[in-house]
Every structure is written in C-alpha cells, then in structure tokens.
C-alpha cells in the first residue's frame, strides 16, 4: 500500500492517518499493537484498567510492536495521577486525553516529550485544547459510542466547524468505519480519523463475544445517547436502557438514575457479555458493520477504500 504523508502521519510517525479509538474493556495491548503493526495508530484504553493492569498492557504492547502506539486516558478516571505517572515512567510517547479539562495534564505530559491529543465535542473545547498546548484534536460527533457531547453535534457539522476554528490538525471521529466515510471526513477538513466501533468488532478486541455479536447484528436506530443528566453515553437499547428510560420518563432524580446505573455496568456488558443488564457502548455506525475481522484487515480495507475513493470520489449518472 502506498504511503501517505500529512500532518497526522508525521505527528505520530505512522503510515496511514487511521487511529484506533481507546475503548474501555475493548482496546488492550492486543488490539493496539495489531493496529500499530498494520500501519495505523493503536491506543490502549486505560479507563477500565487499574494502574498495575495499565502498566502490564503498556509493557506487552512494547513487546508486541516496534511501531508507535499510544494510551487513551479519560480524565475523569479516579486514579488519574497514577496512570499519568506510569505513562511517563514507561516512556509512552503518545497520549489521547478525553472527558475532562485538557489544561490539567497537557503541560506535564508535554514536559516529558509526550505528544498530546484531546478529544472534543465542540469548537469551543477544541480551542481550549489548542490553547492548553495539545498537538491535535479529535472532533468526535454525536454518532460515537460511549461518552459523548451533550450538544449532540453530528460529525458532519462538527468536523468542518472545528477545522475552521483551530490550526492544529483535526482527527474526525464518530460514525466512521469505512474508507469512503474517511474520505468524506478528510474532504471536510480532517487530516485523520479515529475509529472505534469498527475495531470493537475485531478479533483482537478484548470485549466479550456476546458484545461483538450484538454489535454486528444491530441495526439503524438500535443505539441511543442516554443518561444525559449523569455523563451522556451512547449504547444499545437493551433491558438496562429501558429501565433508565422508564425512570427518566417519570422524572427520576439524578440520585435515582445514579443508583439505577450502579457500578461497573460497562464491564458487565462489554467484558462479561451480559446483554440485558450491562451497558453496551456501541456507536451508530454498527448498523453498517456485519463481521468480526482481524484488526490488520480492517486497516487494509479502510485504506484501500479511501484510496480508491480518492481517484473516483463521486457517483455519476
Ligand atoms: P464505574 O464507576 O461504574 O465502575 C468502575 C469500573 O472501572 C469497574 O468496572 C472497575 O473494575 C474499573 N476500574 C478500573 N480502575 C479503577 C479504579 N482505579 N478505581 C475504580 N474502578 C476502576 O465506571 P464505568 O465502568 O462507567 O467507567 C470506568 C472508567 O472508564 C471510568 O473511570 C471512566 O473514566 C472510564 N470511561 C468510561 C466510559 C463510559 O462510557 N462508561 C467511556 C470512557 C471512559 P472492577 O469492576 O474490576 O473493579
């Protein structure tokens, strides 16, 4: 496959501007190293890992790939300072932060020579991330799985808005699983894409097979952005979601919603495969994903379709 050079491939020293999203209970060292070995950028999702587990995943990833990889750190993680310390001690070169204020950690990470990218859901936050010293931003739209912006700005609107606001490179995320979707995002001003749900349906993803099967069988309209009074999250409409909806419809308090959510719902759904009681964090794009593939094949397919699309981008009569 031909090499492609732009600001994103140069920033991370990778072949293709395809980044695998950090996903709790899903993207450990196996997935991250497979994506990096295929020429993209793999990210270890640290949000569901205790500090010693994160350390082990970083070490295994270093053994499994000689190519660049990174760690995604959700800033609302309870032991965030321990995660940051491990990342610095282990010599991780790339960190993607999300769900929090980029001002808190960006400076410290950059002092240690780490490339920092922050995930945003609005132009205002993109500007904040740039001002905090981030090297790039991920503009993640409404279609994305997991934690998401309250304002519900779609990828189609968010990407050009952010690209017109900041001067650092913009990586598009939310609803992207194919090369043609990647091409559309790049035409709108992105210089790379971050892909989550497509990689969750990979052989190397550590999520439970029940979860992967639910993903590849879900249809348009099967996911929803919910729990906006707590932290908004996109998930599959299952029994747990119906419980949340019933409570929200009758005006339940934030405390009651918190007690319905309880603890470790994401682990139950994604890692343990409980399709009724678990939180099944899946993006809208699952509607067009129908198979579980090796991560390297996903990278190859996306890139080939992107390059084919570049030479023949628009359907003609
Ligand atoms: P909960 O508070 O419901 O549960 C905590 C979960 O995180 C448990 O499953 C626990 O594992 C695991 N965990 C890992 N490290 C720690 C730690 N140091 N202290 C406590 N628990 C830890 O949170 P969620 O499951 O919703 O989210 C877990 C983390 O993932 C959060 O910190 C959040 O930052 C992050 N995250 C969540 C997303 C989401 O959409 N839910 C999206 C992105 C990131 P165990 O059960 O083995 O104790």
Image (tube, rainbow, N blue to C red):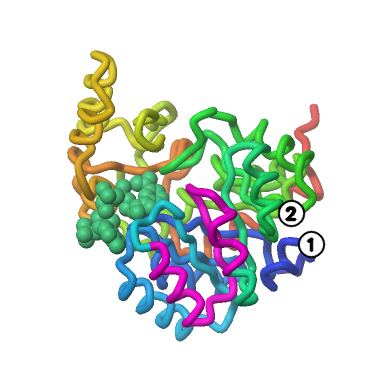
**Residue at image point 49% right, 40% down:** 144
- Place of residue 207 in the rendered image (x, y in percent of width and height, measured from the top left): 31, 57
The verdict on residue 301 being magenta is no
Left or right: 220 as drawn, with respect to 141:
left
What residue range appears in magenta? 80-108
Looking at the image, which is closer to me, 38 or 174? Answer: 174
**Quick one: label 2 or label 1, which is nearer the N terminus?**
1
Mark closer to the observer (2, 1): 2
Give residue 6's mark: 1
Give residue 250's mark: none
Q: Mark 2 touching mark 1, by CB under 8 A?
A: yes
- Place of residue 286 in the rendered image (x, y in percent of width and height, measured from the top left): 44, 41
**Residue at image point 38% right, 56% down:** 77
Looking at the image, which is closer to me, 12 or 83? Answer: 83
**Residue at image point 19% right, 33% down:** 260
Does residue 186 lie above or below 114 as drawn? above
Does residue 87 lie above or below 311 as drawn? below
- Disc 2 crowd, CA 10 A, few/some/many (<14, 14-19, 20+): many
Q: Quadrant of ligand 1?
A: bottom left
Question: Circle 2 is placed at which residue position?
Answer: 169
Q: Is there any visible trace of residue 305 in the rendered image?
A: no
- Disc 1 crowd, CA 10 A, few/some/many (<14, 14-19, 20+): few
- Place of residue 135 in the rendered image (x, y in percent of width and height, measured from the top left): 69, 60
């Amino acid at each position: 496959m031909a090499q492609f050079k732009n600001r994103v491939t140069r920033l991370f020293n990778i072949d293709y501007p395809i980044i695998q999203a950090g996903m709790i209970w899903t993207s450990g060292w196996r997935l991250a190293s497979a994506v990096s070995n295929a020429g993209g950028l793999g990210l270890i999702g640290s949000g569901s890992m205790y500090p010693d587990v994160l350390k082990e995943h970083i070490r295994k990833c270093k053994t499994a790939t000689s190519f660049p990889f990174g760690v995604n750190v959700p800033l609302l993680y309870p032991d965030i300072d321990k995660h940051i310390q491990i990342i610095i001690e282990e010599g991780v070169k790339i960190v993607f932060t999300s769900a929090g204020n980029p001002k808190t950690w960006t400076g410290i990470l950059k002092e240690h020579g780490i490339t920092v990218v922050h995930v945003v859901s609005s132009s205002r936050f993109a500007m904040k991330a740039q001002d905090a010293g981030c090297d790039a931003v991920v503009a993640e739209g409404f279609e994305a799985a997991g934690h998401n912006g309250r304002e519900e700005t779609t990828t189609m609107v968010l990407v050009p808005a952010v690209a017109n606001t900041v001067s650092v490179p913009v990586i598009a995320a939310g609803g992207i699983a194919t090369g043609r979707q990647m091409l559309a995002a790049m035409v709108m001003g992105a210089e790379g894409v971050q892909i989550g749900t497509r990689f969750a349906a990979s052989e190397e993803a550590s999520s439970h097979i029940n979860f992967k099967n639910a993903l590849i069988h879900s249809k348009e309209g099967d996911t929803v952005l919910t729990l906006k009074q707590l932290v908004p999250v996109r998930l599959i409409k299952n029994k747990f979601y119906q419980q949340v909806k019933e409570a929200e419809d009758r005006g339940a308090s934030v405390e009651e919603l918190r007690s319905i959510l309880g603890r470790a719902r994401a682990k139950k759904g994604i890692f343990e495969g409980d399709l009724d009681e678990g939180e099944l964090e899946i993006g809208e794009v699952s509607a067009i994903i129908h198979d579980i593939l090796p991560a390297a094949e996903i990278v190859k397919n996306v890139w080939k379709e992107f390059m084919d699309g570049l030479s023949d981008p628009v359907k003609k009569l």
